Image: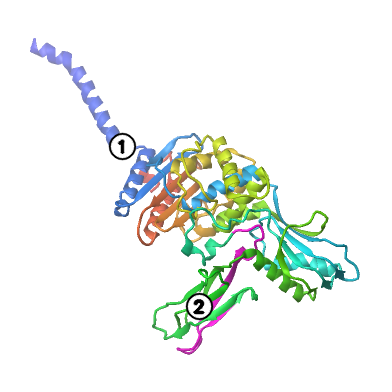
Amino acid sequence: MKQFLLLLLAPILAITLDCCSAVDRSTREETPLQHFRRSMDALLSDSIFTATRCGVKIVSLDNDEVMYERDSKILMRPASNLKLVTAAAALSTLGINFQLKTELYSDTIFSNGVIRGNIYIKGYGDPDFNSAQLSDFLSVLKIRGVSRIEGNLVGDASYFDDEHWGAGWMWDDEPSGFAAYHSALSINRNCVEATVTPSNTPGDTVIASIEPSTRYVSLLNTARTSADTAPLTLEISRKFKERMNVITVRGEIPRGSRPQNEAISVWNPELYFLTLASEELERQNITLHGKLLLDTIPPAAVLIARHIQPIDSMIVFLNKMSDNLSAENTLKIMGAECYGVPGTAEHGLTAAKRILSAFGIDTTKFLMVDGSGVSHYNLLTPEILTMLLRGMHSRKDLFDLYYSSLPCAGVDGLLANRMKNTPAQNNLHAKTGTLGGVSSLSGYVSTADGEMLAFSMMMQNYIGSGEAYRKAQDAIGALMAGFSRTHGPSEHK
């Protein structure tokens, strides 16, 4: 009887043992996606994340699968990742054919080389307008034979309101070029470029210069050249507390050091624009008898010239170089075009939120107060940013420009020196974001199989340098770019 029972149970025991063996094998053998997730967990278990916050979301744009997420619904400061929102809203609201302009008017008909009234320059917020373009712009007067202007040179900045900074910007950032005042009359990014070069003899005053050379700013240089082995203590600033356009150069620079360059913001950029314009008129031998004034153009004024800047070049510079002036001016341009003049940040934010809402994003679940991400008031989540990236990917009319405007790993923009010699090089397109204690990276990358992913990594609340966090982001970027669903972990390490 026992022998009969053993014979009867033998097939059942064999099946049970086979099932146990199969379960055991399945726990040992990972799918490529499981291996990817485990690798992500390992990267984010580094001790640098012990006292910081880190939110990540990675989604496949081919099938909407969530590849990985960690604290993706936690609100964090996005820094310049907010420019992804501003650029998307601008392209969606204004369209890819929108043109920024700067216009030149006269309120009298001129003849015999004389303008007997005023000339006017009206700005519409072009953040890329520069001194070279100003020269070409005003050369129209010379071409038309003008040699004297008896009236005033009037600047019209009424396309924007008179708020020159974003909400929550820090007062002590003011001298820095990244915190330049935004204005409808913008030129040279509303900055001057200071260059300081050591002399050949320790103890001598350094060589300092300003570009463009203009009477609008003055230079106070008390810096000295030090011995070759001395530390660099050079400080280039402006008397910003006094609201003065006096560039100050202090401290020491060792002999043999490379020239030091610093973009310094100017106070009252509208008058900076007009001063540069008056100096350009002098270079073109056109005499201006009147004053430099700020006012609006009278209805009877006659258009003489118009400078045009396409939106695509502005969006590319905004994202590639993370230009804050471009972002803030863009926000107000949206406000003016959607809700009327003067353009305000509040109206621009309303236009931006309307676009986010169209992508299925709940606009009550985040806080956006400026266009650039300079403000620490801004709060977004990795989930919201990946929803935005997915929404822009679906806009076939806009996506090519949006995608190409983002820095490319190992190639250009602020990612030119990152992720070199990895699968992410010349592949990953993403926007960087950096503030004190904040480092973010969000964008797109193609896997080894050609699958397009959208991702957002937001890291914050650390002390000191963000280099370790950028390295972690680069490792994740390379991991995403090297991922393959068709090869096992050992085949695509």
Residue 406 horizontal/vertical position (percent): 55, 52
Q: Give the residue at mark 1.
A: 29
Q: Is residue 67 left or right of residue 311?
A: left
Q: Is residue 221 above or below residue 486?
A: below
Per the rendering, the mark at residue 4 is none
Q: Is residue 183 inside the magenta stretch?
A: yes
Circle 1: element type: loop
Which residue shows up at 67% across the image and 62% down it?
129
Q: CA distance from mark 2 to mark 1?
A: 64 Å
Q: Is residue 16 above or below residue 330?
A: above
Q: Amino acid at mark 2?
A: Val
Q: Residues within 10 Å of mark 1 (few under 14, many from 20)?
A: few
Taking the image as drawn, is residue 159 in sight?
yes
Residue 196 horizontal/vertical position (percent): 53, 78
Circle 2: element type: strand
Query: In front: 201, or 390?
Result: 201
Taking the image as drawn, is residue 255 in sight?
no
Q: Is residue 389 above or below residue 144?
A: above
